[in-house]
Amino acid sequence: MPDLSAVAEQLASQEIELPSWAFGNAGTRFRVFETPGVPRDPFEKISDAAQVHRMTGLTPSVALHIPWDKVDDYGELAAHATENGLRLGTINSNTFQDADYKFGSLTHSDPRIRQKAIDHHLECIEIMDATGSQDLKIWLADGTNYPGQDDMRARQDRLAESLSSIYARLGESQRMVLEYKFFEPSFYHMDVPDWGTSLIQVQELGDRALVCLDTGHHAPGTNIEFIVMQLLRAGKLGSFDFNSRFYADDDLIVGAADPFQLFRIIAEVVRGGGFGSASSVAFMLDECHNIENKIEGQIRSVLNVQEMTARVLLIDQCALAEARSAGDVLRANEVYMDAYATDVREALFAWRESRGLPGNPMAAHRESGYDTRNVETRQGGRQASWGA
Ligand code: PSV
Ligand code: MN
Ligand code: MN
């Protein structure tokens, strides 16, 4: 069993934010399957997130999506989170479901629609004021489907203008993170398709505007860890949306499709100072559980991140540095791969128990009867994306 004692405190500093939408029903455009016992409102989503935190000790915050998580009183929602041992995290805006946004939102050529999209973000910031949330996350569906459809450059200029009105409203301790995605729902061009565009846009705004990297939003074969390294180097990596993809924006459990990629990403995070209590990089999940149990899906996800983090922390940095400076290509690779190949599950079991957590969070959740109670008491749970 590997010895985790040298990295025990680092592991204890890990925090992963859960997405409220992971707890509701989700699906594809073909079918949304209903799961008995899913939350009926944002309060119940938070209760489910709290269950993940009780089992794992890893998830003290939960991200909201507006308007899916719209409530009358956000102070009450924040109090509910506190009572359940959580805090409210990132506020995600939504400018992709209103009919007005057919041709864009923050990039739209019609100033009325642009203003409507800006106002939505200002409302999100008001919610942040009420919940104490630190981050506003912007993901835009904006783009075009056909060459010549619109002036890509003018759209970029309008985006810059819209973002600066939103940025101007942020409080001193609040941040904006701009997420990119290379395609979908726009298929010819997306207005924020890549980290370069996101970086250029946020750089114009100021220190509190940063990039959000969703691991599922790159073309196949992209070296994501290189992007992580570069953004950290520029001091511009604000947050992660962790998930897995086999083909497109699959939103599957992080670490499920390509565990080695997750290892490589976390290795660059640690290398670049993006991990630990001194870092301001937010580790979030952005996942949907279409066919699997939702709370278990979240538990599996955070355990995958934790296991991979433990393996990364075990990289023998001295041996690695030595091999690198000696130009010993294969020795350096071997040191790296040795850490990746280390089975940390048993050691993490003991580490959790030593901290008063269930050694096996998944088994503890199953034994807790939490899901069974919800199936009995919650009737008519909602589809995640249509919220309360
Ligand atoms: C759409 O691609 C998306 O999955 C983005 O990744 C956002 O982060 C998420 O939806 C929630 O808006
Ligand atoms: Mn995302
Ligand atoms: Mn996505």
Image (cartoon, rainbow, N blue to C red):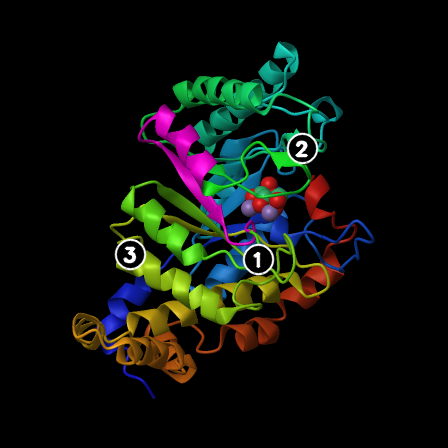
Closest to the camera, between mark 2 and mark 3, is 2
Q: Residue at x 43, y 80 (%)?
A: 345
Q: CA distance from mark 1 to mark 3?
A: 29 Å
Q: Is mark 2 within 8 Å of ligand 1?
A: yes
Residue at numbered disc 3: 276
Question: Looking at the picture, how far across and down is residue 104, in whole percent?
Answer: 65, 25
Residue 299 visible in the current orientation: yes
Q: What kind of element bears circle 2?
A: loop
Dot 1 alpha-carbon crowd within 10 angstroms: few under 14, some 14 to 19, many 20 or more: few
Q: Quadrant of the C terminus?
A: top right
212 drawn magenta: yes
User: Within the magenta stretch, is there residue 251?
Assistant: no
Measured along the vertical axis of the image, is residue 331 above or below residue 85? Answer: below
SS class, disc 1: loop
Disc 2 marks which amino acid? Phe
Q: Is residue 41 left or right of residue 303?
A: right
Can the viewer see residue 133?
A: no
Q: Which of pointers 2 and 3 lies earlier in the amino acid sequence?
A: 2
What amino acid is labelled 1 in the image?
Pro
- Asked whether the residues under the numbered discs 1 and 2 touch, taking CB atoms below 8 Å apart as contact, a structural biologist would say no
Locate residue 189: give its quadrant.
top right
Which image quadrant: the N terminus? bottom left
Nearest to the observer: residue 132 or residue 216 = 216
Return the residue nearer the eye: 150 or 387.
150
The residue to which callout 2 is attached is: 96
Q: Which residues are magenta?
A: 196-218
